[in-house]
Amino acid sequence: MNTSKAPARKGAASSARRRARQAALTGLYQWLISHEDPAAIQVHVEEQEVHSGCDRAHFESLLHGCIAQATQLDADLSRHVDRPTAELSPVEHAALMIGAYELRHCIEIPYRVVINEAVELTKAFGGTDGHKYVNGVLDKTAADLRSQEVLAAKADRS
């Protein structure tokens, strides 16, 4: 039995999911700027290199789920942002939406992973210190949306 394949699959799945988040960020950025039709945005993103090798199902879930639930996600985030979400940088706003969506709907992804992935997106595509802002907002949002998981993690650390 070749055990070396198991970690490679996990890493490959992780990379595919990370690329899905990057593709979704691209699409959400476009939607936040233009409010273009989500189906047209999906077609446009799928034509770009960022979509190559991504977890297509996760990409579609993020893109369409974030757009369809934008009002709810912004409400989740609004308790912890210092200004209306419409005034946020589109990159930070898109990363926060992805994070809030995953916290709310992708329970199989640990909350720390959700936050880390959103921070990494913001580091790669956002402003100089935007990742710090995204980290703080999502940390507080996780406490709201996944209180038991957050409390259990804090208990494990003490």
Image (cartoon, helix red, strand yellow):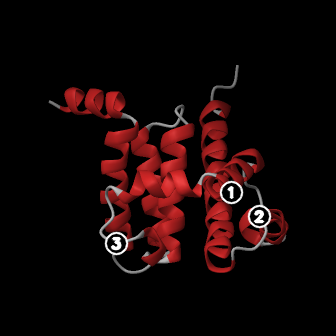
Residue 87: x %, y % from top left: 44, 77
Bin the neighbour count of mark 3 within 10 Å (Cα to Cα): few under 14, some 14-19, many 20 and up.
Answer: few
Asked which secondary structure carries label 3, the reply is loop
Q: Nearer the viewer, residue 157 or 100?
A: 100
Tell me where residue 154 sits by quadrant.
Answer: top left
**Is 139 situated left or right of 50 in this image?**
left
The mark found on residue 135 in the picture is none
The reply to whether the C-beta atoms of the residues labelled 1 and 2 are less than 8 Å apart is yes
Q: Is residue 8 left or right of residue 81?
A: right
Task: Locate residue 125 relative to residue 47 in the image: left or right.
Answer: left
Query: Residue at the spot x=73%, y=54% of the render?
Result: 54
Residue 36 image point, x, y percent = 75, 74
Q: Which residue is mark 3?
A: 83
Q: Alpha carbon of mark 1 to alpha carbon of mark 3: how far?
A: 24 Å
Residue visible at 84% across and 70% down in the picture = 47
Rendering quarter of residue 9: top right
N-terminal of the two: label 1 or label 2? 2
In front: label 3 or label 2: 3
Residue that badge 2 annotates: 38
**Quick one: SS at disc 2?**
helix
- The percent position of residue 142, horizontal first and vertical second, equals 37, 43
How far apart are the two marked residues, 3 and 2, measured between alpha carbons?
A: 26 Å
Identify which residue is drawn at 84% across, 69% down: 40
Q: Which mark is residue 63?
A: 1
Q: Amino acid at mark 1?
A: Leu
Determine contact: label 1, label 3, CB under 8 Å. no
Of marks 1 and 3, which one's residue comes earlier in the chain?
1
Which amino acid type is shown beneath numbered disc 2? Pro
- Badge 1: residue crowd in 10 Å (few <14, some 14–19, many ≥20): many
Which residue type does callout 3 highlight?
Answer: Arg
